Amino acid sequence: MFLAGSAATAAASGYAALMAGQLVAGVACGFGLVVAPVYIAEIAPPSSRGFLASIPEIAGNSGILLSYIADFALAGLPMSLNWRLMIGIGAVPPLFLAAAALLAMPETPRWLVLHGHHDDARQVLVRTTGGDAALAERRLQEIVSSVKESATKQQLSAAAAAAAAGGASTGVWRDILVRPTPAVRRVLFAILGLQFFQQASGVAAMVLYAPRVFNHVGVTSERAVLGATVLLGATKTASIVVPLFLADRLGRRPMLLSSAGGMAVSLLVLGFSLRVSSSSGSGSEWWAAATSVAAAAAFMATFSLGFGPVIWMYGSEILPLRLRAQGTGIGTAANRVMSAAVGMSFISLYEAAGMAGTFYLFAACSAAAWVFVYACLPETKGRSLEEMEALFDAAHPSSPPPAS
């Protein structure tokens, strides 16, 4: 679908065909946002799951940066050709993805067990545990036990729902939306809360409207605005590498708490510099502009330390096996809807509340995100996926140390 969307858009002969190609590419993006974290969470060993689950976010930011470079390189070509090449070049990476899926990517052991392919699951586990057959067998038995327990819960839930509805049954979606267990309800609350707060912090507004923000503090030179915007992109891309190495050492909660706190402080400083710039004379504009750019860069950096990549790994690893794909899809949809709402309302919001007031609001949302993480999210570092449902059955988010 990535290949078809890029190729169709590049070959479009009119507006309708252009939008149809973009629609296909957008659906492909949705698949990628759901499938990649689920696949990595299910196939990665617990000891390195945080490291591996950070890769999609890093790859996404790197891809955006590469697209900027490609656009810049192709901009000098004739107008009838340059935009088609800019979009059409996006059909090349899916070829490598298809080759990797065919030649190097096994199905996840949990999916194989769920569909009765125990021997295939054992072979995959041996590969992903470095050839340790004993460890692979122990992981396999954990997965088999989890699948059996999950199936029993699902049968009991289905029987209760069918009795209440006169024999009707709606399967997985019923277990998520209609009659979720207390543990599933807490898991969904955690996922939707993280996705909401990620976008409520205003990251979409910063990405889309950074030039307007910098213009507001007196940065009017096109070259200076471009340089400041590139600084934000480079900071975001560089900082997102940090969780790759720390997620499995520090844990998910410390990284999310540090990220939310840093975002709140950065946005407060940004709002203050915007307020000073709008109420003072031209003599203070230079330091207000410098402070605004530094605060915006700090916001991007602290966002990338936790709320950028960690929420995706956290959401994909806490969902029960039988609900993982659908639950991840719900979280992704909530994230995209909230991102669109922030991006579409930003101009109206700052015209009504002022630019400084808008970023004060984003700072308040980031502070609320800190409270949410502290009060509602247990630590998942070092735990197997089979332990997660029991973890969320606990009454308090402060979890005991993971099993050795």
Image (cartoon, grey):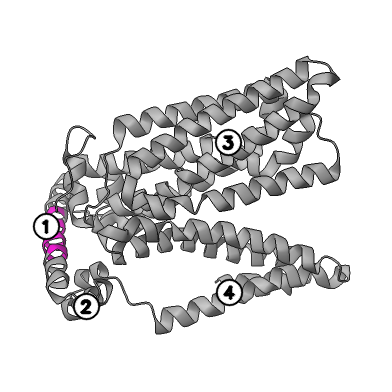
- Label 3 sits on residue: 202
Secondary structure beneath disc 1? helix
Q: For residue 349, which quarter of the picture?
A: top right
Marks 1 and 2: in contact by CB < 8 Å? no
Indicate left or right for 116 with 273 as reference. left
The tag earlier along the polypeptide, 4 or 1, is 4
Alpha carbons under labels 3 and 2: distance apart: 45 Å
Q: Which mark is residue 252?
A: none
Name the main secondary structure of what is drawn in magenta.
helix
Amino acid at the residue labelled 2: Gly
Secondary structure beneath disc 3? loop
| Start-end of magenta stretch | 142-153
Amino acid at the residue labelled 1: Glu
Check disc 4: other Cα within 10 Å, few if <14, some if 14-19, many if 20+: few
The tag earlier along the polypeptide, 3 or 2, is 2
Q: Can you say whether 108 is above or below 123 in the image?
A: above
Marks 2 and 4: in contact by CB < 8 Å? no
- Label 4 sits on residue: 93
- Label 1 sits on residue: 149
Secondary structure beneath disc 4? helix
Name the one closer to the observer, 151 or 234: 234
Alpha carbons under labels 1 and 3: distance apart: 41 Å
Alpha carbons under labels 4 and 2: distance apart: 31 Å
Residue 174, percent from left and from top: 27, 50
**Count of labels in the image:** 4
Marks 1 and 4: in contact by CB < 8 Å? no
- Of marks 2 and 1, the one in the foreground: 2
Name the one closer to the observer, 37 or 156: 37
Secondary structure beneath disc 2? loop
- Of marks 4 and 2, the one in the foreground: 2
Name the one closer to the observer, 386 or 231: 231
